[in-house]
Amino acid sequence: MNASASAPASSPASGPATRHDGALEKTHLRLGFVPLSDAAPLVAAKLLEFGHAHGLTLELVRQPSWAAVRDRLLSGELDAAHALYGLVYGVQLGLGGPQTDMAVLMVLNRNGQAITLSNRVAAALDEHGSLPAALATLGRRPVFAQTFPTGTHAMWLYYWLAAHGVHPLSDVTSVVIPPPQMVPSLADNELDGLCVGEPWNALAEARGVGRTAAYTSEVWPDHPEKVLASRRDFVERYPNTARALVRTMLEACRWLDEPPHRSDIARWLAQPELLGAPEAVIARRFGIGDQALQQPDARRLPMRFFAEGRVNVPVPSDGVWFLTQYERWGMIAPRDNYQAIAEAINQTALYEQAAAQMQVVVPSAAALAAPQTFIDGRVWDGNDPRGYVDGFDVKA
């Protein structure tokens, strides 16, 4: 594993490298990750060298922020990365940075994020019973943090605030903070709340500086979270390599969903060069350890990595949902091509090919498109994105 990036890994080239004999076009891959528990598939794949069986050597490169992941994917310093679902869509649309055609190779996990409130706001919420009343006790504009403007954490936070009668654009100040800096910022009284992946919510509670108010699986049960992302020209130039990488990550995700292995990954992730958080804190939100077993939180759906392959399909309608939220919050103008954008980004055919090679069953289209009910009672099925957006009362 590495801690910094150097020479470009897959800079755009003038000619195709595709091998029609099935051989890999590229065998050494540099993969970026941000210090979060859901980087586990990349960590397991590297430490157990799952890539070797598929002709790959993996190099993990820790990144300080999601902006760094974006920049190093675009520069070619990374071949692929553990990335926020919404980050990929934001780059595709050129929101807040350069526009580049992007690819989602597979989903790495579902669930596993949370919203944490400062102790002061959490206590006020207990006393007053509503989030607007609790925030009003501050006597100033509340400050909430998320990790990337178009990312999943921003969308979960905005949706949760709106569902509780707080407008995320006009009622609060939203700031971007890298995940490892969330707990120190909360401890320094710079934040009133935050949305981030684990283990940072669990660490805030362990250190007594905040309280988990909601799990993102309460916002959208079994929501897609991190994905294996690359530039689209990586897939076009190295399709055999891309399929081999998906096969490798499927093997890692399947390994992670076996309960005994959660203890192993918690121990490995605790290493300073990975997350640098206490093993017990990481384990708790994986649902292991004495405290987690004695005091399970019924509100939280488990972080899933595989679930017989149901986790991993890059379903275009999931991507369309993020586009509807960008429109809802005024980040993009209304469009009528959301499905086409999502189908170009989400490499569903490539994933299905790799899954078949691994004998991983791909759920039926009907199962993948089943309607899903959110925290506010709104139902999402992807068939009518225009009606879905127009139906929100709270929006930009």
Image (cartoon, helix red, strand yellow):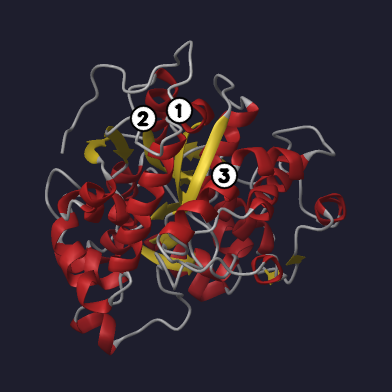
Distance Cα–Cα, label 3 vs label 1: 17 Å
Residue sitting at 62 percent across and 55 percent down?
A: 315
Disc assigned to residue 298: none
Residue 156 placement (x, y as % from top left): 56, 55
- For residue 106, side relative to residue 155 (left or right): left
Q: Which residue is mark 1?
A: 18
Q: Which residue is mark 3?
A: 347
Vertical placement of 169 versus 387: above or below?
A: above
Q: Counting other residues with Cα less than 10 Å from the Cα at mark 2, is it few (<14), some (14-19), or many (20 or more)?
A: some
Answer yes or no: do the residues labelled 1 and 2 have beta carbons within 8 Å?
yes
Q: Secondary structure at mark 2?
A: loop
Disc assigned to residue 25: 2
Residue 151 placement (x, y as % from top left): 53, 43
Q: Counting other residues with Cα less than 10 Å from the Cα at mark 3, is it few (<14), some (14-19), or many (20 or more)?
A: many
Vertical placement of 177 versus 164: above or below?
A: above
Q: Secondary structure at mark 1?
A: loop
